[in-house]
Amino acid sequence: FLRTHLVTYAQKRKALELLKQRIAVLEEIELKLSRLERLSDEEQKLFEGIGSEDLRQKVKEVNLELQGMVEANRLTSAEKSDCLEELESKMAQVQEEIAKAEAEGKTKKVQALAKPLEVLKSTQSQVKAADPVSLPPLKNGDKIRQLRQKLAELERLEKATKTKG
């Protein structure tokens, strides 16, 4: 499903956001249950549906797909810009954590954070160097093109009959 229906980075990114939102809702429901609070009908339906562990597995799959798309340089120009912004944000967070760890004198933590920072920098340079890909073709693009041509022909005929009459 992921590879056939969600083909662009942006689509997969949106799916990831939605999965994370659903996990957060399920965790709130589980917290309510642990406090022995009553669930609403909607919460009960959500809780009885797919579990948060299944969703976490899907999050892992989507993350792997996204990472694969970045590594394979399969990003459109807009997706490339979004990805670079996201990488900048993540690098800033890691650099803040490194600065905090250095201020606290935690050298092991600084060393542990250095590797993810290098991975982010490497990914950033790879994304910057990659040429953007074009959008995938529309599912019914040929039919849409045919219908537009037919519409244009009908509009031309309509204008021709208006000028004669």
Image (cartoon, helix red, strand yellow):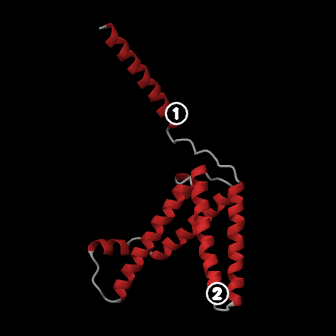
Residue holding disc 1:
142
Asked whether the beta carbons under mark 2 and mark 1 sit within 8 Å of each other, the answer is: no
> Residue 10 appears at what percent x and percent y?
53, 56
Asked if 31 appears above or below 126 in the picture, the reply is below
Residue holding disc 2:
101
In front of the other: 15 or 163: 163
Nearest to viewer (mark 2 / mark 1): 2
In front of the other: 86 or 99: 99
In front of the other: 84 or 134: 84
Residue at 62% x, 66% y is: 87
Question: Is residue 1 shown to the viewer in this render?
Answer: no
Residue at 38% x, 15% y is: 157
Residue at 32% x, 13% y is: 162
In this picture, residue 86 sits left or right of residue 157: right
Q: Quadrant of residue 89?
A: bottom right
> Residue 93 appears at what percent x and percent y?
59, 75
